[in-house]
Image (cartoon, rainbow, N blue to C red):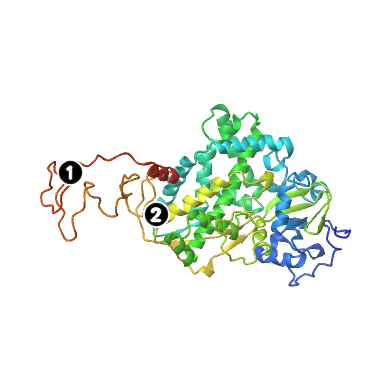
Amino acid sequence: MTPESHSPTGTDAPRPAPPPGCPAHGTGPGGLRRLHEAEDLKELYEELRSEHGPVAPALLHDDVPVWVVLGHTENQQLVRTPAQYCRDSRIWSPLREGLVKPDHPLMPHIAWQPMCSHVEGDEHKRLRGAIDAAVATIDFRGLRRTINRSTQRIVNGFCEEGEAELVGQYAEHLPMAVMCHILGMPDEYNERIVQAARDMLRGTETAIASNEYIMQALGRLTARRRAEPENDLASHLITHPAGLTDEEVREQLRVVLIGAYEATANLLANVLRQVLTDPRFRAQLNGGQMTVPEAVEQLLWDEPPFSTIFAYFAKQETELGGRRIRKGDGLLFAPLPANVDPRVRPDPTADMQGNRSHLSFGGGPHECPGQDIGRAISEVGVDALLMRLPDVELDIPEEELRRTESIASRHLVELPVRFTPRPPQDVTQRPSHQNQPPAQQDWHIGVSRPQSGPAPAHPASAAPSGQRPGPAPQPAAVRPGAAVPVPPSAPEPARPRGAWQRFLLWWRGY
């Protein structure tokens, strides 16, 4: 255990704060770092790791003390030991002592609410069970079709321009369009709800108002589905045997909507940035050495969608990473530094393909319930965009790309690109390189896959090189003008799609 301390975070005695104008900006009482003033959270986390080890003291807005958990092992211990740590902020000492005001910018994240991520025991099982059951009803084949159609609609909005900004016009819109469809409120999808989600997650001065806007939209959805249930996630929550109240339904919908939206918007932008700025990465995708799902997993290691998760609270006096944690202390679960913990990843640039032990989706009882939805949107969204715009290129030097920093996440500001202008495509068709989707070719196991180019009118042997192909086969034994004999029996009519083709089409969402 660490020695007794008078600091609210359990650190050594407070040190004098730097005088006004001192270069040691971004520090508060006791010389602790203010997370919300950091210009580069990655750099700050490494400085904290060097100074304090795997668990470091820091400050939130209004100089509210908190622990930042930096180590991979320590983060796992935090989320997987519910007997010691919980998500119920009502036991948080700064909140109980009045240090956290009702208008605190992080209040939408920290204030206790009747949702699965804030409760424990039987109540957690009841609410989380309802969410898991609702998510389990999602048809992922149909989900991929929805993602493709949403991609087509969004790309149709800028494909003729020859230029676009892929964060604001694509990465922030595709996840919200898909999530509104999944929840059952496609009519609520618009620029306003996208901006409200972004504002709330940044923890700005208007975050509380943005949260209220989203809750009103979810309230309208709950009222409609309570009266007329349909086959969507909101209806499945309402009709679940757990008997959720309207308030509980709204809160669980918010958990799924915001969690999946933010994670996916950041992940999608990060994968696209990597494709556009790293020729080797793109070559691996184009050459088949890396699949899009593998690329997504690599970025979950390198750029987790959430820098930190608000928040866990100590239920009892304990120890974590060599630090004494007092009952009521707050702790930030931090995937960003945990994923590059030198104890588990000595080389932060190492290829992590096939390794899913990153902490980007949390862990333990509160592991993200919508992570498979986020993966599907990112995988299909990247693949579909590159199909529509195969020659897309970054339109500014890589070093000019900027990010906004918040305690919760690192968000790419913009990703301007250029490409060959292309006409819109039918939203009901799969995204294609061509101006019009190519006609599908039937094939099945036991028959050669059709070759590229115009398909022959009949599966008979092709004419030898240099010889003009003859007309379509006649019912005679020999085709006029052909130099080779025709097989003695007439070819079979085209058979239905084989199992492999049907599986591929199902997997791709068509």
Q: What's the residue at 53%, 27% (across, down)?
A: 228
Instruction: Tell me the residue that label 2 is attached to.
Output: 388
Which label sits on residue 488?
A: 1
Q: Residues within 10 Å of mark 2 (few under 14, many from 20)?
A: many
Q: Residue furthest left?
A: 480
To which quarter of the image does residue 213 belong? top right
Whole-Å distance between the Cαs marked 2 and 1? Answer: 45 Å
Name the mark nearer the viewer: 2 or 1: 1
Q: Residue furthest front?
A: 488
Which label sits on residue 317?
A: none
Q: Amino acid at mark 1?
A: Pro
Q: In the picture, which quadrant includes the N terminus?
A: bottom right
Q: Position of residue 204 (x, y in %)?
A: 65, 54
Measured along the vertical axis of the image, is residue 383 above or below residue 91? Answer: below
Q: Position of residue 113 (x, y in %)?
A: 70, 40
Q: Disc 2 or 1, which lies upstream in sequence?
A: 2
